[in-house]
Structures are given as structure tokens and as C-alpha cells.
Image (cartoon, helix red, strand yellow):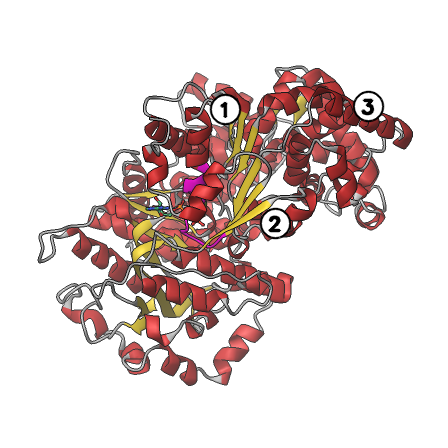
Amino acid sequence: DQHRVPDYLSGLNPEQREAVETLDGPVLVLAGAGTGKTRVLTTRIAHILATGRAFPSQILAVTFTNKAAREMKERIGLLVGGAVEGMPWLGTFHSIGVKLLRRHAELAGLRSDFTILDTDDVVRLIKQIIQAEGLDDKRWPAKQFAGMIDTWKNKGLDPAQIPEGDARAFANGKGRELYTAYQNRLKTLNACDFGDLLLHPIRILRTHPDILREYHQKFRYILVDEYQDTNTAQYMWLRLLAQRSPSARAANGDGEQASGSWPGDVSPASAQASAGRRDAAVSASQKQQINICCVGDDDQSIYGWRGAEVDNILRFEKDFPGAKVIKLERNYRSTAHILGAAGHLIAHNEDRLGKTLFTDRHDPEDGKVVVHAAWDSEEEARAIGEAIESLQRPDRNGKRHNLNDMAILVRASFQMREFEDRFVTLGLNYRVIGGPRFYERLEIRDAMAYFRLVCQPADDLAFERIVNTPKRGLGDTTVRNLHDYARAREIPMLAAAGDIIETDELKPKARKALFDVVADFKRWSTLLETLPHTELAEQILDESGYTAMWQNDKSAEAPGRLENLKELIRSMEQFESLRGFLEHVSLVMDAEQNEDLDAVSIMTLHSAKGLEFQTVFLPGWEEGLFPHQRALDEGGRAGLEEERRLAYVGITRAKRNCHIWFVSNRRIHGLWQSTIPSRFLDELPEAHVEVAETEQSYGGYGRGGYGQSRFDKQEPFQNAYSTPGWRRAQANRTDATRDNWGNRSGHAIERIGYGESGPRARTIEGE
Ligand code: ATP
Ligand code: MG
């Protein structure tokens, strides 16, 4: 029966169906959180396949993470019944870019087996180039320049195109020269960086109309999720692949961004000629529709700091004339309270299109969003841990919650540490999504290697890890010598170092450097018995130059790493000794990270985009942390609005329960500081939000969750917050507190970095 509606369509609402069934022509779905945008994309692909309009290999579909791509593939399989054979072009921008580039590598001056450099490789290479130019790489740090190149590439700019001001800003006006030298070096090395995975294909498609035509014919359908977070380069790339009618190109009239020529590649004249040839070819071969469908939500644009351009959404209709814009307003994910809270909060942003969201769900059982106060982050972690445990127990209907249905979403990665520690103590399974676990982070491993070696001088792995970190001029040769020396005598490397500095086996410079290392460790091990271990740990990181290494580092990650190091020292306080702490960490590291395990998810708000959970915990809603001080300092009002969108993303991840936390004290630089509750708390509507009563054991979770002693040591907490919640706390804040915050330039809390937040969109799979 031809008229029977397939199962996969029957569950959709009319607008969603329209978005799925409008297969010809450009479609933009602009809609709030939880309205089924991702579901529309998935169903649309299923529909294309089920109606035989295209083969899986003719569909280009872009997701924001590799995980999202995998899930989408699985769901499509379920919808059409039976596994989908391949979907080679479903993935992140990077994973699709690498595939394109491998096919045409020679046109970018590469071989198809080119390597992709990671950030460390890139920095090392740039440093060589800076030095080769005879420049002082201390004055002109390679990391900083790597960041600049990344920004240019996000904007789709090759060396000839970077703004004059940018080029002048670095290395006495040598910015452009260095960028060119870098690109040339990459070619010689048969390598590219992440930005090139988009830039090379863009350039190839621009300059080879025949290839462009091939892809125009190949990709019958283009689909993009999370469109609000595409950057300029991704947008240019999409437009090249999607836009094939000359009238569309003429109509939008802005030549410079996507249709401009590439100086250095082709002369404007020849570029125009090739564009002309291309257009002629297109009209000759087919005047086919541009079947592109992008879905997004301007309120969820949270990667502006990494070059995302929310304006891409606004330009869509201009770029794709005749585009059908579909709005979805019914939310299927969350309760009315959660939607009410999120909607009210985001309405404080001026810079937004504005949308309606409603739900049909009106269950009197649904609880409001709950705001909780805790004395400090340790209590916050303890209370959330208890809440999770009580959710796991069967309720009066015998229903219990899976850990998989719960998530903790933090603003900055350092906040994860306390939860990870707590969950290990409780024996609660957890998994960290979108980044390494706290103790797996590079800077934490380095620091731990120092501590291990002080406690256990025979730990050669630790020794090798830090002997030249920070750089001390102890190169691979020296380390190899040392290794052989130690092997021959069957002694640990640190001991071998102690011996070898008495000989003349090493060059004077290396010998001196090693001498200092040996002396440092000798001194630290004697202090092990006398100095409090947290002080010793701090001293080790300072005296070894490790802290300074990150302080001098100009990269975007450095502030987050310093913050993590401080958190590491803080985390030691609850242990008696450095040894006790090391033992604890090895237990934490041993905790299983099994995909199939029922486990609480811990992640940054940035990585939570697109996901949903029954219960969401949002800790750390304090001024300076959330909204983040750096976003405010660097971004002004725009920065604040992006933070608010992040809060909106956080709340809208929750299906049924949303618990927001703030603490009244955070420890910064070993000193307790009073904190101010986040302004976002004040922006939540009273109708949908309640403040957890502190006398009660745990609002909404039933009594008995807390131990008796909760307030034993917490008089001020009780006084400040028992009633009426955070508003009172805010009224109580003193000028002294404000001064503390106001004067804190360069202070720890301002440096809580974006850290390693954000999904690893850059992980490339299928490689
Ligand atoms: P976000 O903006 O957070 O990415 P989204 O708009 O992509 O959200 P989805 O994740 O696609 O929303 O959908 C949210 C939830 O609503 C999912 O659990 C989805 O299965 C469900 N859903 C969407 N449409 C329908 C529908 N027509 N009927 C029932 N459930 C639906
Ligand atoms: Mg989605």
C-alpha cells in the first residue's frame, strides 16, 4: 500500500515531518533544545535511504562529535530496519575532511599517506621555524603563534589573506613570512595540521572545477547538525559543496568570504575563469536542487571562543535562496519546570533570535529545578554523591534510577577532580566524557611523576618522564647514556645520575643540569619526613621549574593546566602523607572506564551539547567560575552571553530533574575565599525553581541522605543559607568580598581555563 505512512514518520509532529519530507531544496531547522532537531536529521537520512533517493555513500552528514556520528548511524539502522551498509561520509568536519584530502592529497602537495600533526608537534615545528628565522623564541613563543595560525585557519585564511594587522603583530611584522614558512615545512614533511584538513580541501575544490563537479554529483544530500557552532572555514567548505547554481552565487553578492580567489594560488583572473567554467559545466550537466539541511539553535552557540560564527545561521537564507526555514517549538525532552527555568534564563540575552518552546507534558509529580547551597566544593561533591546513591535505591514504586541516566556537568575541568575522588571512595561507577580523567591529564601525570620519584627513587618511568620536563638541556642522547649506564650497573636511573655526574661521561652543560636534578631530589626526599606533604608538593613543583613552565606558556590550555595543578595540591589535603595520596591515585586510575558499565557521566558543559539525561547536576554556579571570569574579561557582554548560553545548554540536558549547586567558599591559593552565587541563579524564575531547604536532609530525595554532622563545622553556612536561599546569601556579601574579586587580576580563579573542555571533535576516526 503506497499510502501507508512508514513507521519512522508516524511518530513525528507536522513540523518535524515537513523537515524530514522536504527533501528538495535547502532546509534550515532553527529550533530550541530538545525539539527533535537531531531526530529530524536522523529520520531524514532514513527517509532518503528508505525511499531509494540515494545510496548511503551519496549522503554527506556532519555531526559535532565522533560519538554522535556513531549513534546516528545506529539509529538510522534501527529506523530503516537492518544495518545500514556504510555511510562513509557521516562524521565530524575533521573526519570527513581527512577523507577528502587523502583522495586528492597530491593537489595539496602531499602524498596520500600524509601524517596529521598533533598540537605538540605543531608547536615544536613552529619553534624550529622561529629559531631558523633568527628570532628569539622566548620573546615570540611558538605556542602563541600556533594559536594565531589556528585562528587564521578557522577563518579560512591562508598566508596571503591574513589581515595586515595580524601579520604585523607577531615577530616584528614577520607573521606572514612565518606562516608561509610553516606551510612549506608541512609540505616537506608530508604532513598537515587540523586546520589543513578543511583548508586544503577548500582550496582543492576551489581550483579544480572538475573535482568540485564530481562531488556535486556525488553528494545528493548534505546534512549538518549543531549548525550554530560551525566556524568560517567549515562554512566555506559546506557552501562550496552545496552551492551549485550560479544565480545563488550572484544573488548573495558577498564575494570576499567564500567565493573569493586565493591569492598565491591563482590570479583573480584565472580564478574567475575557472569559476565561469564551473558554472557553465553545472548548468550544462544539471540544474539540480541544493539538498542541504542544517539544524541548529542560536541559543546553544558555545564555541565562539574557538572561532564558531553563529551568524552562519542568519546568513543561511541569503546564501541558499528559496530555503525553507522550519521552526520546531514542541520540546520532547524536558519537564515544564526545566523548560521554564531555561527559557527564562536565556531571555536575559539580548543577542538572540528568540524562540518559543512548549511541552505537552504537565505531570504534577514533576519537581522544580532545585538550587542547592554547599559550604565548599568538598561538601558539594559529597552531597551530590549521596543524592546519586539515593536515586539508585528503589523508590516507593520500586523504581530505581540507572547511573547511566545521570550526569554531572561542570564549567571547568578542574571541578571534576573532587567528584572523581568522591565516587571512587563511594564505589560509584563514573565515566569522564570528552576528555581525559583528572589524574590522566598531562600536567597531573607530570606532577605525579615528580612526587613518585621523591617517594620511590627507583621509579625509572617517572624519572624518564620528568628528567627533561621542563627543558633542562638533557636531550635524548643524555637520557640514553644514562639508561645504558643504569642498566649496566643494575641500578635505578636516579642513582645512575648521581654516579655519572662524578665522571666525565657527559658534556659539561648536561652534567651541570643533571647535577641540579640529583641535588633537588636529594633535598626533597629529606623534606619528605619533616615538611607537611602539601607544602612539599608545592615546593617541588615550584623549585623544579614545572609551575613556571606553564606560567610562561602562552597557549590557551596553560591557565587550565595551572588550575588543575592547584587542584592537585588541594586534593592532597585529605591524606596523611604523599605516599597515602599516591596510593589513592593509583586506585582511582584503576577504576574501570568501561563503555557498557552503568556509570554516572562527568563532563564539561561544552561536551554535553546534544546529549540528554534523566537527572543533571550542575555544580559550581558562582561568580568567577560560572560565568567564568576570563570570558567576562575577554569577551565583555558577548562573553557573558556565551556563558549564559552554556547555562542554557546545561539546564536543557535534563529530562526530569535538574539540580544546580553553588558553594559559599572556594579555596584558592591555599586561602579560603567567600564566593558570590552566580548571577544566573538570580535570573531563574521563582515559579520553576525552588531552593533546597538545608535543614531537610536533601530536597527532593527524601530524608536520611546526610549524616548527622553535616553542619557541625559549618555554622556560617547554616546562618547564611537556611532561608531564604541564595538571595539572602547575596544580600550578605560584603564589600570586602567584592574587593577580593575585583582585585584579583592574575589570580587563580581568573585563570580557570577553558582547559581541555569541549568534545574531542578533533579526534579523527577511521584513520
Ligand atoms: P538539542 O538542541 O539539545 O541538540 P534536539 O533538538 O537535537 O536537542 P533531539 O535530541 O533530537 O532534540 O530530541 C530530544 C528528545 O526528544 C529525544 O529523546 C528524542 O527522541 C525526543 N523526540 C523528538 N521528537 C520526538 C517525537 N516526535 N516524539 C517523541 N519523542 C521525540
Ligand atoms: Mg541535537
Q: Give the SS element for disc 3.
A: helix
| Kind of residue indicated by mark 1 | Arg
Q: In which quadrant will I find the N terminus? A: top left
Ligand 2 shows up in which quadrant of the image?
top left
Residue plotted at (49% across, 55% down): 563
- Residue 53: mark in rendering: 1
Closer to the N terminus: mark 1 or mark 3?
Answer: 1
Q: Does the magenta segment cover residue 338?
A: no
Look at the image and give the residue range highlighted in magenta.
31-41
- The three-letter code of the residue at mark 2 reads Ile
Tag on residue 277? 3
Q: Is residue 336 visible?
A: yes
Assess mark 2: CB under 8 A from ligand 1?
no
Up-down relation of residue 762 to residue 600 (above or below): above
User: In the rendering, at what x and y percent does residue 638 appear?
Assistant: 61, 63
Between the residue at mark 3 and the residue at mark 2, the CA separation in whole angstroms equals 30 Å
- Residue 36, given in percent of the width and then of the height, sits at 41, 46
Q: Which mark is residue 313?
A: 2
